[in-house]
Every structure is written in C-alpha cells, then in structure tokens.
Image (cartoon, rainbow, N blue to C red):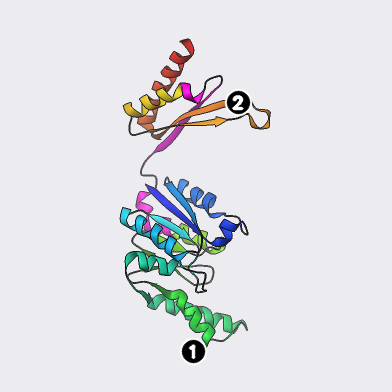
Amino acid sequence: MSFGLLVIGDEILSGKRQDKHFSQVLSLLSARGLQLSWAAFLGDDRDRLTEVLCRSFERGDRVISCGGIGATPDDHTRHAAAAALKVPLVAHPEAVELITQRCYEMALEGKGSADMNLPENRQRLKMGEFPAGSLIIPNPYNRIPGFSVADHWFVPGFPVMAWPMVEWVLDHQYKHLHHREALIDRSMILHDLAESTITPLMEAVEREFPQVKVYSLPSMGEGGARRHIELGVKGEEAAVATAFAAIERGIEALRSA
C-alpha cells in the first residue's frame, strides 16, 4: 500500500537545513512492507500548500506531512489543510489539555508560567487549533500533538518528534496493511548495451506484465567502475519471477542478434 510524503519548510529549500525525513520515512515504511509512491518538498507558502493538499485530499492519498504545524507566522500547514478541506480551524479539546499540561510541566522546571491567560501561553494554545474533524497524533517528546484528517498525518518538522509520531501512525492506524503485499525487486547488470537498445524490451515486458514495473538505472562509471545499466523488475513475487524470465530471454536475444 502506497503513501505520499510532504516535507515543508523554507529552511529545506534554502539549504539552511538538510532534509532527513525522506530517508527515514522510506525506511519506516519499508520495514513494514509499505511503499512511498511520491514525495514533495514545499516552502512556507500557504497558497501553494493549499493547492497541493487539495489535490492529495481529492485523490484520497495517504500522506505523511512533516513541518509547519507550529504557531508562528511562518507556519501555514494547519491553515492550508483547513482551507483545502473548506473547514474552519477549531481548538481541539484534547490538544488544548495536552498543551496546558506541557505549560504546567515547563513552569515546574522554571521555564515560564502555567497561567494560560498569559499572551505567550495563549499563543502556544494555537498549536492545538486543527481543521474541524481532526484527530490528534500523540507526541512522546513534549506532549504537543500533531493532527490527522482524511488519511493525512501532520507532524512537526523536528525529527526527534516527527519520527516516533510517524511510527505511531504506521503501527496504530495501518497495522492491518503491514506486509500485505510481498513485493520484491530483481535486477541484472548489463555492460555494452545502450538504454535505447533495451527500451523496446522494457516496453514489451510491461505490456505483457502490467502488474510489474520495469526500470533501468544507468551508471556513468563513477569511481572508476565500468559503465553499465542495472535493468530490473519490481512487484509481487510471482509476477516478478515470470517478467524477469522474459527480460532474461530478451537480453539473450539482443546479445545474439
């Protein structure tokens, strides 16, 4: 079962911070037999975020979104999600309670006040305003929750918070999908054959076996290695076995021609 990933933040696009979410989310999904079907990197632009979320909501995608759910002026993800769904932002009662608990804990540590009428705490409570109908995603790091709506799961940009929250989503909301499809990948290394030569074979195999994907990964000989193409097939095990056998026969025919 496939998922999409959104990584949100101007700091990623400017290079001020390096993205770590893509590889980690890919690893978390793969460990559970799940797949990432697309990923997008977006800046802190409310209109663009709204446009992208409109499309993913309409398609019924399962989406993990990292970043932009705070309450500062450059955090637009909560507002964009509400706009895309055409619903208001509302204070989530459980989120308000969790944020209040966090403020109390910080006050005990000598970091601020537990008075929720203070401006800074009223501002913190905005992090509990989610699109109407949202559920919360627990945050084991500091209690400040993320939110989910319509199979979209919104977590903070900080890896220390985001990754345990993504694991919670995958293990509590999609456990029934774990390892449901036994997907494999088989490939071979080809020397002295051009991609243009093997392309007709790839197209023929995909037509004959529409349930698999055929791919080619050319190498230009980096690090002194010999130039080559990795030609492979990925999909369900039974289909891959027959499709890969067809590829082997096709390559043998090309070499003997």
Snapshot quadrant of residue 77: bottom left
In percent of the image, x 36 and y 41: which residue is there?
A: 181
Q: Residue at x 63, y 24 (%)?
A: 226
Q: List the residue tagged with mark 2.
A: 227
Label 2 Cα neighbours within 10 Å, binned few <14 / some 14-19 / many ≥20: some
Per the image, label 2 sits on a secondary structure element best described as loop
Q: Position of residue 114 (x, y in %)?
A: 53, 86
Label 2 amino acid? Arg
Query: For mark 1, does the 10 Å Cα neighbourhood hold few (<14), some (14 to 19), or many (20 or more) residues?
Result: few
Name the side, left or right, on which 21 lies relative to 46.
right
Q: Position of residue 249 (x, y in %)?
A: 41, 17
Q: Which residue is mark 1?
A: 117
Q: Is residue 137 visible?
A: no
Q: Is residue 139 left or right of residue 180?
A: right
Precedes in sequence: disc 1 or disc 2: 1
Q: Nearer the viewer, residue 132 or 48?
A: 48
The segment highlighted magenta reads 169-197
Q: Is residue 172 magenta?
A: yes
Could one spot residue 18 in this view of the protein? yes
Pick the front one: 211 or 196: 196
